Image (tube, rainbow, N blue to C red):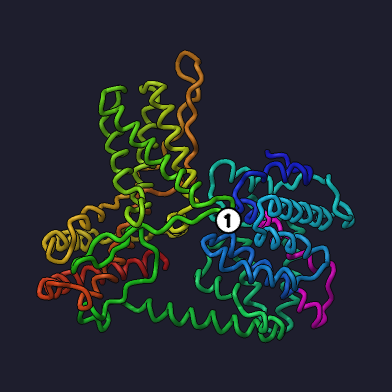
Amino acid sequence: MIDFKSRDAIEAWLSGRPREVATVLAARAALRVIPFFNRWRNESDESRESVLRLFRALSVLWTSAKFPAYCTELRPFASAAANAIDSDPSSAAASYASLAAISLDADAYVVYASLAIADAAIAVEDASGGVSFPELSAEFDSDTETAVDAATIADGLMPAALAGRSLWQYRVPDWAKEAWLELKHELLAAHEDWDVWTDWYDARLAGKRPWRRSLEIARATLPDELWKQGPKAVNAEIKRLIAAEKAKTAANRQSPRKDVQSIGDLKPLDISSPVSFKWQDGVIAIGGSALPVLGPRNDPRDLARKMQACREIAKDISAKIAKGRYNCRIEYREHLEGYLQWFPEDDDGNIYLADRSARALRELLVAEQDELPPPFVAEVKGFLEQHIGIRPHFPELLEFFESVRTHALQEPLPQDAVDHVRQGIAEATPEVFAPNVGQALDVEGGPPSTIEQPSTTDGSGTPKIELPPDPIQTLNPETEKASAIARTLNALGKILKQGPDYVKNMEAWEKISTQLLPHLQTIIEWLWNKAGL
């Protein structure tokens, strides 16, 4: 277990780690303290306004942790929430955690995050019957839950994925359950639509996937003027937003086959896709890769060097394999060449497909490490470490894999529909589709990620090279494959609809649109009904 017995120890552990790590640990620590607000509140209107300010701060904070791509957009709202929050002990952790989320200086966010975790640990100890709430000191009993969170990060879990997990990773303590039920009962009894917050917190306790990302962003970015009007006004507006999202979802969940007569009637979903498309010179082509996001301590040159290192290491290993330096299977070179083909450069490439090649390479290496020369294993290990290090700069990649983790597919992907679309694309290339479209649709997902790391010693007892843990190795390969294909074809349907504005060969476009329409409908319907979207 990671030692978090002092604030200095927390600071030391957080130092040098990305802001996202500090933010998620501080957010989760502060969220665990919400139920204990009852110790300092009464049932007055003023007290409920204090609860609202606490929920406001933690909503912005948790949304920043869960959706790091929106950190810059959310920063002013986090600042406003931090300024409005009360000074009672249960809010102290939320206040420090909010400051960690908005601080631009690395040293500052480490200090504020450690203060938030320490304050939360003391509040939890007090609530569980340990001690009366003291002034913050440097020493306190180990915050087991935050230490568990830190250990999962150290093992390779992405911060955004940790944000979505249940607050208490083993079980909610009885005293925490009782405190929350008491606070929840009092809030609901006020008849001010507090269910918009009690449901939200229940979801955080259970580790449920956010109902809609757009709703979480909307909740976190409500204007300051509205918050000043108090719980009744704020909660009513959030309830209106929830109702609007539910109505939109209900309308979208109606069978896509209904009233769809032409490609213009098709209703693709607004979801992420591992492959993007664009109209280029009158045909559909693969879209450019999303731009990587700079971390708080990076400048453009640093990020460029990281990405250059990934490319150059892959090239070097591939060239050595081609020269016969290592006695290994050709598949290793094929995965490296696939990586180089899709690795983003300028506005070209596809980070999902490049990442797929890197994961396939790792799984092959894990399975065959005993038979491979140690120098080769060491070189590939260095490459994998370099690649894993740039993943956080591509939040759309992390978001896609998190959605794969949280969707349970009850029915298999309609493969007949997929095959018909593939065949139609081949027939309409190059009149409507660029040649690389068919190639990029081969989003089969990585190989099964359930291979256990072999023993750390070989037969002679010599220590083996330990490969870096893959933060996304827990993905179900069948789920990933089905989701990737369906989401890609959903994105293709979206771009295909734009044909009249861009296509050169209108006759070919009309023919292929008619041919693909029923199959795209089937796939979109599957996404809605079977993937839980």
The amino acid pointed to by label 1 is: Arg
Q: Please determine whether, in this image, residue 359 is positioned above or below residue 43.
A: above
Q: Is residue 521 left or right of residue 48?
A: left
Asked whether 33 falls inside the magenta stretch, the response is yes
The image shows residue 54 at horizontal and vertical percentages of: 73, 70
Q: Is residue 386 left or right of residue 343?
A: right
The residue tagged 1 is: 165
The foreground one among 313 and 129 is 313
Q: Is residue 199 left or right of residue 517?
A: right
Which secondary structure, mark 1? loop
The image shows residue 42 at horizontal and vertical percentages of: 84, 76
Asked whether 240 falls inside the magenta stretch, the response is no
The quadrant in which the N terminus is found is: top right
Q: Quadrant of residue 324?
A: top left
Q: Which residues are magenta?
A: 26-50
Q: Quadrant of residue 506?
A: bottom left
Q: State the count of labels.
A: 1
Residue at x 77%, y 65% (from the top left corner)? 91
The quadrant in which the C terminus is found is: bottom left
The foreground one among 395 and 248 is 395
The image shows residue 113 at horizontal and vertical percentages of: 71, 54
Residue at x 73%, y 65% (from the top left corner)? 34
Q: Main secondary structure of the magenta part?
A: helix
The foreground one among 178 and 451 is 451
Q: Please determine whether, in this image, residue 472 is positioned above or below residue 413.
A: above
Q: Is residue 246 visible?
A: yes
The image shows residue 360 at horizontal and vertical percentages of: 35, 40
Q: Please determine whether, in this image, residue 252 is positioned above or below residue 484.
A: below
For the view shown, which residue lies furthest in the top direction? 460
Q: Is residue 405 visible?
A: no
Q: Which class describes the residues within 10 Å of circle 1: few (<14), some (14-19), or many (20+)?
A: some
Q: Please determine whether, in this image, residue 170 is positioned above or below residue 261.
A: above
